Image (tube, helix red, strand yellow):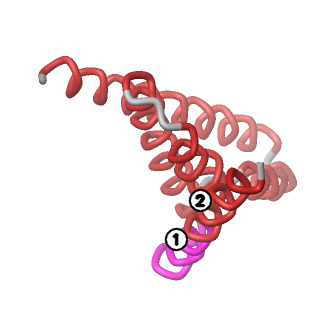
Amino acid sequence: MWKNSLFVGVGATFGVLLRYGCMQWFEASIVLWLVNGFGSLLMGLLNAYFETKPNAQLKLLLTTGFLGSFTTFSAFSADWLHHFQQSPIGSIAYAFGMTLGCIVCAAVGYGLMKKVRHAK
């Protein structure tokens, strides 16, 4: 149990540091789109990868830990609230766009990994 917590914690430390680095490099208005989209793509890739190469601790490190802290639903929610205060209709478009975009990225990542695995 404690070993799994350690894997999650180490992954989370690196994920949040990378997200913070992205916040320093990119404009605030696009950071969440970038990290959530890229994180969703990686989540799709990793989920497909771990279907054929199960490794519970590595999966905890990379998905729950790293990607769980790199991507952020709470920041998305706070950003959505800000958009809602400015434009309720625009905030609905923002929420659907982010959600659909992340789902598409995850599906693309999953499909890419399946294609790479099938090509071998």
Residue 15 in the magenta stretch? The answer is no
Instruction: Tell me what residue is drawn at x 64 percent, y 62 percent.
Output: 12
Element assignment for label 1:
helix
Based on the displayed image, in which of its 4 quarters is residue 44 positioned?
top left
- State the image coordinates of residue 62 (x, y, percent, origin top left): 52, 50
Which residue matches tag 1? 18
**Residue 82 or residue 53, whichever sits in front:** 53
Q: Are marks 2 and 1 in contact (CB under 8 Å)?
A: yes
Tell which residue pokes out farthest to the bottom in this image: 24
Looking at this view, is 17 or 32 the one in front?
17
Q: Residue at x 57, y 64 (%)?
A: 15
Say left or right for 89 vs 64.
Answer: right
Residue 57, compared with residue 85, is above or below; it is above
Which of the two residues, 42 or 32, is positioned nearer the viewer here?
42
Mark 1 residue crowding within 10 angstroms, few (<14) / some (14–19) / many (20+): some
Residue kind at label 2, given as amino acid type: Phe
Q: Residue at x 73, y 48 (%)?
A: 73
Please, what is the dominant secondary structure of the magenta stretch?
helix
- Residue 79: image quadrant is bottom right
The percent coordinates of residue 43 (x first, y second) are 50, 39
Q: Which residue is mark 2?
A: 70
- The image shows a total of numbered marks equal to 2
- The C terminus lies in which quarter of the figure? top left
x, y percent for residue 36: 56, 49
**Which stretch appears magenta?**
16-28
Amino acid residing under circle 1: Leu
Question: Which residue appears farthest toward the top when viewing the image?
Answer: 118
Q: Residues within 10 Å of mark 2 (few under 14, many from 20)?
A: many
Q: CA distance from mark 2 to mark 1?
A: 7 Å
Vertically, is 11 above or below 48?
below
Q: Residue at x 69, y 50 (%)?
A: 4
